[in-house]
Image (tube, grey):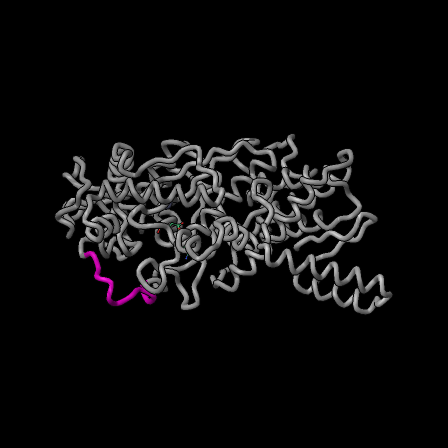
Amino acid sequence: MFYDIIYFIEGEFMKVYNTLNKKVEEFLPHEEGKVKMYTCGPTVYHYAHIGNLRTYIFEDVLEKTLSYLGYEVKRVMNITDVGHMTSDGDTGEDKMLKGAKREHKTVYEIAHFYTEAFFNDTNKLNIKKPSIVEKASDHVKEYIKIVSNLLDKGIAYQANGNVYFDVTKANDYYRLSGKNADELIVGAREDVEEDRNKKNPYDFGLWFTVSKFENQAMQWDSPWGRGYPGWHIECSGIALKYLGEYLDIHCGGVDNIFPHHSNEIAQSEGYLGHKWCNYWMHGEHLNDSTGKMSKSKGEFLTLSLLESKGYKPLVYRLFCLQSHYRNQLVFSYEGMDHASNAYNKLVTKVKMIKDNLSGKLEKEVIKQYQTKFKEALANDLNTSLALTTLYDILKDDAINNNTKLYLINDFEQVLSLGLLNEEKITIDSELETYIKDMIVKRDNAKKEKNFALADQIRDELKDKGVILKDSHTGTTFEII
Ligand code: AMP
Ligand code: ZN
């Protein structure tokens, strides 16, 4: 394939870690200049926890990086409102029913409420809504088409009213997870009850009619009886309908690798008869101090909880961008406090630049910094290095403020930290009076030629994050 458009910088393409091949690779989409991207959406039975939101921040940065590098991105996301069990296999309780029981509402009410809550959260985090967002429950026709095709080919089978995918018929079923069947059986939990209708333990449900959830609220007619789709078929059905036969990037959190994404590959490729998606990217988890984050155990960490404790949502975005998406990240309030400090300093500096604009745009400087920024992101989304480039600009005394503002604006297309909208941090009047008193004390010390005291006052203030600036009109201060 020949690429004559420069998407990154001469001769170089973006590089991403591809879970399918377990290595960092050059990213080459099927169609020049265009990217088809699918990201698994939320299961709308409860609020998203901030771990879930970390994954959506990673995907947002990926989409925006691709656009920044010159690609036209078409992104699709599903809303899981049916078929997802509390276990990612076919066992456990139906998550939507669980939500409905908990709140004495219908499954439809629950789905509607938590879909809105999800977009409310993502909006606060400056996460762009994918251009196509589709509900799983609206695409039963697509699932029936795929399942019928798989049955015709003998890749799927019916047992006791349900339809299952036969994983022994899949091409390289364990490739994405890098595991093998024996390993998975050894790893399986003994208390997870097995579905006796399956031929192999890793066969998975495509369509259920006979289930232990007799009061399953969402049901549809199908050639195999009234019932509902399995969770995995939803993503294949929606992706194939809106993005066609060839997908460039598919994303999710690492827990999606097995079984969800492995099953998506098996059924999509079984249906299509060829390879479906070239790049699989997975975000590592956000953990709490006890390990895995959960909606039912420990503190249920939501964005609203962080807000109620005084943290701005975009501070959480910065907290996430400071680390690489493929590293596990441990959440702590201490970490949030640091991010909050860093965020406030950034906002204050940007405001100072906005308030003191001067100079002509320095084109060469802009190009150099943009190249650094692109290099960082194009290297498998090195967001912390991208942030360092931003910090370098802010402290570069050799460039003028118009140039700085131009670059901040430019980088914000990807970082989306709201740096240009936030108001400067206001300081309380008590602190202001204290600083002004100290400035008077220092002026007096200087008049009395007591320079040691003058320097001591300046240093004490500096330790408190207050920088004094002397000019012929007097002394001003800046909070950093
Ligand atoms: P769910 O709503 O449970 O389907 O999950 C939504 C997204 O969050 C999926 O892409 C999961 O892989 C991801 N996810 C789940 N737990 C975490 C976590 N602790 N940290 C980061 N992402 C997560
Ligand atoms: Zn999915």
Image x and y of residue 316, in percent: 50, 53
Q: Is residue 387 above or below residue 275?
A: below
Image x and y of residue 181, in percent: 35, 60
- Quadrant of the image for the C terminus? bottom right
Relative to the observer, which residue lies in front, 225 or 130?
130
**Residue 78 visible to the viewer:** yes
Q: Main secondary structure of the magenta part?
A: loop
Magenta region, residue range:
185-195
Relative to the observer, which residue lies in front, 264 or 120?
120
Name the residue located 40 percent from the left edge and 42 percent from the top edge: 120
Name the residue located 75 percent from the left edge and 34 percent from the top edge: 361
- Quadrant of the image for the N terminus? top right
**Residue 51 visible to the viewer:** no
Relative to the observer, which residue lies in front, 333 or 149?
333
Image x and y of residue 46, in percent: 31, 50
Q: Is residue 67 left or right of residue 78?
A: right
Q: How many marks?
A: 0
User: Does the magenta run of residues contain 271?
Assistant: no
The residue lying furthest to the right in this view is 449
Q: Is residue 4 left or right of residue 20?
A: right
